[in-house]
Amino acid sequence: MNNGARRAQWKVRIEKWRQSGLSQVAFAREHSLDIKRMGYWARSFTQHDKPKSLVAVAIQPAFSAMPTAQSALTLRSPSGWTVTLPPDLPAAWLSELLQCLRWA
């Protein structure tokens, strides 16, 4: 059985377990499944099925003057991390960074 077929088979099993109202152990015993393998797949689908959330970004000027083309860009998160980026950073790199932060 290839990986895609195995994944599809376990996805069906995990969905049936979630709808059954049984514990993982009870469902695994009832269907002659390995409980450790079932736990692995349940965690796997939970992690992949989680809806992705966006990171909130608030733009606040650090000073009254408008930034110039030579100003550094500073990103601050509500949780406290700060990233300061150089003014000559390529736009493609910044775009990739923002995509990564979007799913963090």
Image: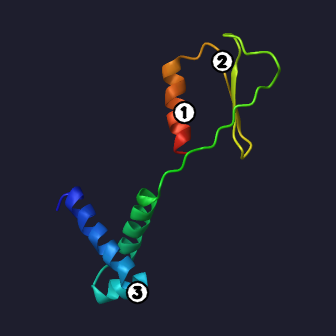
Q: Position of residue 66 (x, y in %)?
A: 75, 15
Residue type at mark 1: give it: Leu
Task: State how far apart marks 2 and 3 are (Cα).
Answer: 55 Å
Q: Nearer the viewer, mark 2 or mark 1?
A: 1
Q: Residue at x 48, y 21 (%)?
A: 92
- Relative to 89, does residue 30 appear above or below in the rendering? below
Q: Which mark is residue 22?
A: 3
- Relative to 26, does residue 70 appear above or below in the rendering? above
Residue type at mark 3: give it: Leu
Q: Position of residue 85 (x, y in %)?
A: 65, 23
Q: Position of residue 35 (x, y in %)?
A: 38, 79
Task: State how far apart marks 2 and 1 are (Cα).
Answer: 15 Å
Q: Which mark is residue 86?
A: 2
In the rendered view, how is the structure colored?
rainbow
> Residue 1 vs residue 90: left or right?
left
- What secondary structure is marked by label 3? loop
Q: Pointer 1: what residue? A: 98
Q: Quadrant of residue 55?
A: top right
